[in-house]
Each structure stands twice: as C-alpha cells, then as structure tokens.
Image: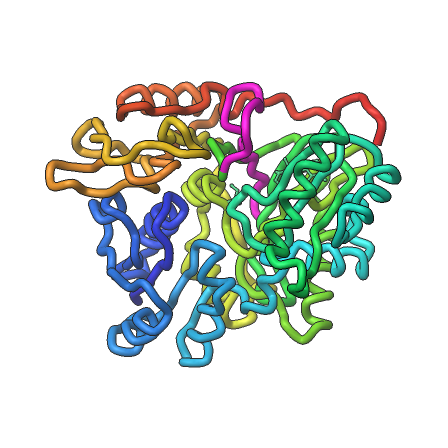
C-alpha cells in the first residue's frame, strides 16, 4: 500500500511520518512537499490536479490524503473520486464549511448550532446599524479563504469602520459586481480550543483537544498568524466533549447529509468556550497546522485504518486511540511574518535532524536547508507531563537557528479560563 499526501508544510510532514509508522504502508509520497520533508520522504513535483491524477493512475497509489484547504476548495477531492482514486478530504461543496463563512453561518443557524450572532452586510450603512445593535468589540470577517487574514476584531467604532471598508472593498472590488457581502459577528469572550472529527459523513470519532496559539507574540499579543505553536491534549476541555459532539458535530454532519453532500474527511471545529458553553468560531475542512504536528505523533491507531474507514463508510466500527502523553509544538518563523520577511537564510541545526522537527517554509540552496517561508519549522516534544514536554521542545528549539528567527516562548502555558465579563 502506497500513500500520497498533498501539500508542502509541517502538517503534511507530520502526516507523512504518521502514515510511515503503519506496518501496512510500503511507501509514503508527498506532493509537492519541501526540501526538509525530502530528507525523509520522496517528494514529487506534482503541482496541479491533472498531474496528480495522472500520477495516481500510472503508479500504485492506493490512497491520497489532502493536507491543505486550497486544493480541496479547488475540487481535487471530487476529481480524484471521479477517477476512481480513494481520497481523504471532503468534496468542494462540503468544504464550503470552511471556504464560505456565510455558508457555514447559515448552516449553523438552520441547525441551531451555538455560534456568535451574525449579520451579513453589503454596505457601510447596513454595517453601522449592526454595530449599534451588537456593540463593541465587533468581529469583521470576509467570506472566502483568507489564510488567517480575513478576520479583524475592532474595539472602537473607527477601527470597525476601517476594517469594514477594507473587507467590503476586497469582497467587492467593483461596485457593480454581485457580491455575497461580509460578516459582522458578536465578539465572544472565552478561551479557544480545537476539536477534530474523523468522519465518513454519517459516523465520526473525535480526537483529543488541541490548542493553537494564533497570535505572533507571547501573552497572545500582536497580529494573528497561521499559528505559532500548539499543544495537546487540552484536558480542561474534556468536560465539554459530549456537548460539542451532540450540539455541534452531529447536527453539522446531519445538515451536510440533508443537503445531499455528506461531509467525509477531517472536520475541524474551532471553538470558543464561553460562559454559555462551547460555541463555533469556525469550521475548517482539514487538519490544522501546527495542530497536526502535535496531534498526529500522539495517534496510536493506524492512520491508514482510520483513512480506510473514512473512505469506506466504516467509522462506526473504527476505534481511534491516542497515547497517554502530551505534545508541545513550537513554531520558528521568519522575522517580519505575518507581514513581509526575508528568505534564503541558512538553517543551522544538528545532524542528523532531531526527531520531532516538521518542516514548512524551507528550501535547499545547494549548501543545505534555507528559509523560504513565513513559518519555517515546528519543533515538537512529548512527555507524560506538559511542563516537561514544553521544556524538551524549547531545549530542542535552542539547537536550531537561522537569521531573524522568531518564536513564542510561552507555548503550552496558557491558563484556560473564561474571563469574568458580560456575554
Ligand atoms: P477565524 O478565521 O474565524 O478562525 O478567526 C480567527 C481568530 O479570530 C479566531 O481564532 C479568534 O481568535 C478570533 N475570532 C473570530 N471570531 C471571533 C468571535 N466571534 N469572537 C471573538 N474572537 C473571534
Ligand atoms: N492553525 C490554524 C489553522 O490551521 O487553520
């Protein structure tokens, strides 16, 4: 059995390693992968759906696992299925849970799934009325995929207006174009956690809870990023699992079935734990990055068995077990990220490459690995104890250097409690 993973970041590196642990898997390929992943796995330069399909048809690839959202949004899962190739990833339609925030919000409203109150607005005038109704702070979201940059939280009316102008302009560059509008959302107070479900569209099993650290700087300061580190499991969230499954995951999967597009693959629920209980902030149609880098090393069950169950509607009888350990992952990023940053800086690290290093924005310049992206790598360590896992991750991190490196020093150290405020 050979597996092909689509994508080029730390998440795909962790997926490759996870599949490689399976005794049933002969070879793991990653397309396109990156120079860091290529140190351990065969990376293939397949850059579009036609070349991926062609490769799968002419080589013994039994399963494709799509890591990132963009190829799913572009319909790669549908195209592979249409060609008789087994794939773990939802259809383009079902992926609207991530690709259209308006689709997701309407689905949640229809099923009374707990989420922030929202209104879709198409003009400044409409937006002013909603700000008056919801109050401040207020959350402004663009509709489509925005790589973590489509959300603004405004604390003053001026900030809100600036963000609304910008969002309206990018969702509707030409005033004459039909557009779906932008979302204004009530601001939720609480703490964030993510839960993933492996699902065949009808049955599912949820994973351990994971916590991402989205802001750039220690203490959750600075701009939002794709994620600067993560840890799992988040034990404080366990008491909400039943509620999340019954009030969020089950009705979400039911709604997709009722629409005639069962959701198959990984469902990512980004949640806010509020005074009123868990509420959905967002859905994603894939594993998170860096969440996958801490989740997958803890997965005890063979990922190939789970993937087969997803593809063959067998999740009802598929156990999913995690090791009784904690994992902490620290992202090292290029100075300047998430805005502009330099690339091509040599990455100094021990040889052989330490275990638990997952490569994202790296390339090869003839002399070795160099930086090539915003988030460069994620360093993961596990232990029975969260504080020791954290120490181990930072000790390993201290052995890796590149020019203008930046990272948070407080991954895994957040206190998860609900602020004592209104709503
Ligand atoms: P999203 O892209 O929807 O996940 O939003 C990015 C980040 O913005 C989330 O991880 C939250 O930290 C924050 N956020 C989004 N929606 C809300 C909300 N309604 N209330 C408070 N924070 C939010
Ligand atoms: N780390 C957040 C995401 O993958 O969307």
Who is closer to the viewer here, 322 or 412?
A: 412
- Residue lying farthest to the right in this orientation: 133
Is 205 positioned to the left or the right of 308 in the image?
right
- Left-right relation of 55 to 68: left
Q: Quadrant of residue 54?
A: bottom left
Question: Residue extending furthest left?
Answer: 367
Which of the image's four quarters has the N terminus? bottom left
**Residue drawn 24% across and 52% down?**
41
Where 402 sits versus 120, above or below? Answer: above
Residue at the far bottom in the pictured view = 83
Residue 11 placement (x, y as % from top left): 41, 46
Quarter holding residue 86 = bottom left
217 falls in the magenta region: yes
Q: Is residue 247 visible?
A: no
Q: Residue 160 occupies which quadrant of the picture?
A: top right
The residue shown at (80%, 21%) is 420
Residue 212, percent across and down? 54, 35
Residue 53, given in percent of the width and then of the height, sits at 34, 74
The one nearer the camera, 78 or 303, is: 78
Q: In the rendered structure, does residue 170 fall within the stretch colored magenta?
A: no
Name the residue at 54% across, 30% down: 223
- Between residue 47 and residue 202, name the one nearer to us: 47
Tell me residue 315's x, y (percent): 57, 63
Residues in magenta, as a range: 207-225
Picture residue at 28% right of the left edge, 40% below the top: 362
């Amino acid at each position: 059995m050979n597996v092909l993973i689509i994508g080029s970041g730390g998440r795909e590196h962790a997926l490759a390693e996870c599949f490689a642990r399976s005794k049933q898997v002969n070879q793991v390929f990653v397309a396109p992968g990156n120079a860091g992943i290529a140190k351990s796995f065969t990376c293939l330069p397949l850059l579009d759906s036609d070349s991926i399909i062609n490769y799968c048809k002419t080589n013994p690839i039994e399963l494709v696992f799509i890591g990132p959202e963009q190829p799913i949004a572009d319909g790669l899962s549908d195209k592979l299925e249409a060609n008789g190739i087994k794939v773990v990833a939802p259809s383009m339609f079902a992926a609207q849970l991530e690709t259209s925030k308006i689709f997701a919000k309407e689905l949640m409203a229809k099923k009374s799934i707990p989420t922030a109150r929202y209104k879709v607005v198409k003009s400044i005038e409409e937006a002013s009325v909603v700000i008056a109704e919801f109050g401040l702070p207020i959350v402004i979201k663009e509709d489509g995929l925005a790589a973590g940059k489509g959300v603004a939280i405004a604390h003053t009316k001026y900030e809100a207006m600036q963000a609304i102008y910008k969002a309206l302009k990018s969702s509707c560059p030409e005033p004459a174009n039909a557009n779906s509008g932008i979302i204004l959302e009530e601001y939720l107070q609480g703490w964030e956690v993510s839960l993933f479900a492996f699902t065949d569209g009808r049955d599912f099993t949820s994973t351990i809870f994971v916590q991402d650290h989205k802001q750039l700087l220690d203490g959750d300061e600075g701009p939002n990023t794709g994620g600067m580190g993560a840890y799992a499991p988040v034990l404080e969230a366990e008491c909400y699992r039943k509620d999340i499954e019954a009030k969020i995951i089950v009705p979400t999967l039911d709604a997709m079935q009722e629409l005639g597009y069962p959701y198959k693959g990984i469902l990512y629920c980004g949640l806010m734990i509020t005074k009123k209980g868990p509420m959905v902030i967002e859905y994603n149609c894939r594993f998170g990055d860096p969440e996958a880098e801490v989740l997958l090393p803890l997965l005890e069950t063979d990922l190939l068995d789970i993937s087969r169950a997803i593809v063959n509607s067998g999740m009802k009888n598929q156990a999913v077990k995690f090791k009784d350990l904690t994992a902490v992952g620290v992202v090292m990023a290029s100075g300047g990220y998430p805005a502009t940053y330099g690339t091509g800086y040599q990455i100094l690290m021990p040889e052989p490459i330490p275990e638990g290093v997952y490569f994202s924005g790296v390339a090869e310049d003839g002399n070795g690995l160099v930086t090539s992206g915003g988030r460069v790598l994620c360093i993961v360590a596990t232990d029975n104890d969260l504080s020791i896992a954290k120490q181990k991750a930072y000790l390993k991190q201290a052995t890796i250097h590149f020019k203008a490196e930046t990272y948070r020093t407080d991954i895994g150290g957040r206190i998860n409690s609900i602020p004592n405020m209104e709503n």
